[in-house]
Image (tube, helix red, strand yellow):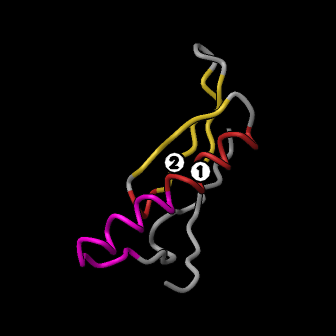
Amino acid sequence: MGSARYTVVFEWDEIDELFIATVPALTISTYGRTRLEALENAKEAIAVTLEGLQAKGQAIPQEDEKTVEVVELEV
Protein backbone atom coordinates (compact mmCIF):
# COMPACT_ATOMS: atom_id res chain seq x y z
CA MET A 1 0.00 0.00 0.00
CA GLY A 2 1.21 3.51 -0.80
CA SER A 3 0.82 6.58 1.35
CA ALA A 4 -2.47 8.04 2.52
CA ARG A 5 -3.36 11.41 4.01
CA TYR A 6 -6.26 11.98 6.41
CA THR A 7 -7.54 14.89 8.48
CA VAL A 8 -7.54 14.35 12.25
CA VAL A 9 -9.84 16.63 14.28
CA PHE A 10 -9.02 17.18 17.96
CA GLU A 11 -11.47 18.11 20.71
CA TRP A 12 -10.73 18.58 24.40
CA ASP A 13 -13.09 16.65 26.70
CA GLU A 14 -13.28 18.64 29.93
CA ILE A 15 -15.12 15.92 31.86
CA ASP A 16 -12.64 13.12 31.15
CA GLU A 17 -9.72 15.56 30.70
CA LEU A 18 -8.42 14.07 27.47
CA PHE A 19 -8.21 14.80 23.77
CA ILE A 20 -10.61 13.08 21.39
CA ALA A 21 -9.12 12.54 17.93
CA THR A 22 -11.60 11.89 15.11
CA VAL A 23 -10.83 10.89 11.51
CA PRO A 24 -13.96 11.95 9.59
CA ALA A 25 -13.11 10.22 6.30
CA LEU A 26 -12.81 6.87 8.08
CA THR A 27 -15.47 7.50 10.76
CA ILE A 28 -13.10 6.45 13.54
CA SER A 29 -12.08 8.12 16.77
CA THR A 30 -9.66 7.56 19.62
CA TYR A 31 -8.26 9.55 22.51
CA GLY A 32 -5.17 10.45 24.52
CA ARG A 33 -4.23 12.32 27.68
CA THR A 34 -2.19 14.71 25.52
CA ARG A 35 -2.74 15.95 21.96
CA LEU A 36 0.39 14.10 20.87
CA GLU A 37 -0.81 10.85 22.45
CA ALA A 38 -4.19 11.27 20.74
CA LEU A 39 -2.41 11.86 17.41
CA GLU A 40 -0.26 8.74 17.81
CA ASN A 41 -3.35 6.72 18.70
CA ALA A 42 -5.14 8.13 15.65
CA LYS A 43 -2.24 7.10 13.40
CA GLU A 44 -2.42 3.58 14.79
CA ALA A 45 -6.22 3.48 14.37
CA ILE A 46 -5.89 4.68 10.76
CA ALA A 47 -3.28 2.02 9.99
CA VAL A 48 -5.35 -0.78 11.54
CA THR A 49 -8.50 0.39 9.74
CA LEU A 50 -6.76 0.59 6.37
CA GLU A 51 -5.12 -2.83 6.86
CA GLY A 52 -8.51 -4.34 7.71
CA LEU A 53 -10.21 -2.81 4.70
CA GLN A 54 -7.39 -3.93 2.43
CA ALA A 55 -7.46 -7.49 3.83
CA LYS A 56 -11.19 -7.69 3.11
CA GLY A 57 -10.72 -6.31 -0.40
CA GLN A 58 -12.81 -3.25 0.42
CA ALA A 59 -12.21 0.20 -1.03
CA ILE A 60 -9.90 2.52 0.89
CA PRO A 61 -11.74 5.80 1.58
CA GLN A 62 -9.89 8.82 0.25
CA GLU A 63 -9.78 12.23 1.85
CA ASP A 64 -11.31 15.06 -0.14
CA GLU A 65 -12.10 18.70 0.43
CA LYS A 66 -15.70 17.82 1.30
CA THR A 67 -14.69 15.85 4.41
CA VAL A 68 -14.03 18.80 6.72
CA GLU A 69 -15.24 22.37 6.44
CA VAL A 70 -13.90 25.17 8.62
CA VAL A 71 -16.55 27.74 9.46
CA GLU A 72 -15.78 31.17 10.87
CA LEU A 73 -18.55 33.14 12.60
CA GLU A 74 -18.67 36.47 14.39
CA VAL A 75 -19.78 36.02 18.00
Span of residues in magenta:
46-61
Residue type indicated by callout 1: Val
Residue 48 in the image: x percent, y percent? 45, 58
Q: Give the vertical position of 4 relative to 26 (above or below).
A: below
Q: Residue at x 42, y 67 (%)?
A: 50
Q: Is residue 17 magenta?
A: no
In the rendered view, does 63 fall on the left or right side of 42? left
Residue type indicated by callout 2: Thr
Q: Residue at x 71, y 40 (%)?
A: 37
Q: Residue 22's mark?
A: 2
Q: Which badge, 2 or 1, comes first in the chain's sequence?
A: 1
Residue 61 in the image: x percent, y percent? 37, 74
- Quadrant in the rendering for residue 27: bottom left
Q: Give the vertical position of 49 relative to 65 (above or below).
A: above
Residue indicated by mark 1:
9
Q: Mark 2 falls on what kind of element?
A: strand
Q: Residue 48's mark?
A: none
In the rendered view, does 62 fall on the left or right side of 70? left
Residue 7 in the image: x percent, y percent? 58, 63
Q: Residue at x 58, y 13 (%)?
A: 15
Report the Cα–Cα distance between label 2 and label 1.
Answer: 5 Å
Q: Is residue 60 magenta?
A: yes
Q: Residue furthest top?
A: 15
